[in-house]
Amino acid sequence: MTLLSQKKMATRILKCGMSRVWIDPARNKDAEEAITAADIRKLCETGVIKARKEKGNSSGRKHDAAAQRRKGRRKGPGSRKGKATASVPRKEAWMRTIRALRSKLREIRPRMERKDFRLVYRKAGSGFFRSRAHMMVFIERNKMIKNDEKKA
C-alpha cells in the first residue's frame, strides 16, 4: 500500500511537504489503519510519522570566502563591480591619505619652523597633497626643513 492519503493528511498536520513525511517502515501496519486526521496526529505524537529535516545549502564556502576577504584577498579587479569608490569608500581613502601625511609631518616637525609646519598641516588638511612623496617634494622645494649642519 502506498499510504498516499495518510501522507497527505500528515503534510497538513506537520506543516511540511510530501517529500518530508517519513513513516516508520516497522510500524507500516499502524499507518495503514489510520484513516482520520486524529489517528495521524496520534501517530505523529508517538513518533511513527515524523517530518524529515529541511535540506539547506551549506554556508561553509561562504564563510571561508568572507574570511579571505577580511584578510584583503579576493578583492582584485575581476571581483569588482561599480565605481572605484564602491570597494574603498571616499572617506576611507581620505582617512588613509591624511593619516599618512600627518604621521610624516609629526616625524619631521622638530626640524621645521612652527609657521611652516602650520602652513603644510593646513594644506594637507585641505587636500592639497596627493601623497607623502608629494608633500615632501613641496617641503624640500620651499626649503622648510632645517639642516642639522646649521644647528651645529
Image: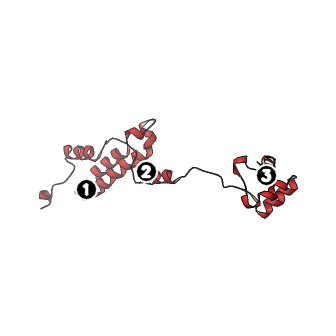
For the C terminus, the quadrant is bottom left
Q: At which x and y percent is residue 81?
A: 45, 37
Instruction: Tell me which residue sits at (15%, 55%) in the image.
Output: 147
Task: Provide the residue designation for mark 1.
Answer: 108
Residue 104 is left or right of residue 66, and the answer is left
Lower position in the chain sequence, tag 3 or tag 1: 3
Residue 110 can be seen, yes or no: yes
**30 or 22: which is nearer to us?**
30
Picture colour scheme: secondary structure
Q: At which x and y percent is residue 50?
A: 73, 57
Q: Are marks 3 and 1 in contact (CB under 8 Å)?
A: no
Residue type at mark 3? Ala
Residue 35 is left or right of residue 122, and the answer is right
Task: Provide the residue designation for mark 2.
Answer: 69
**151 or 76: which is nearer to us?**
76
Whole-Å distance between the Cαs marked 3 and 2?
45 Å
Residue 131 is left or right of residue 72, and the answer is left
Residue type at mark 2? Arg
Residue 24 can be seen, yes or no: no
User: In the rendered image, which quarter is residue 150 located in?
Assistant: bottom left
Task: Determine the secondary structure under disc 2.
Answer: helix
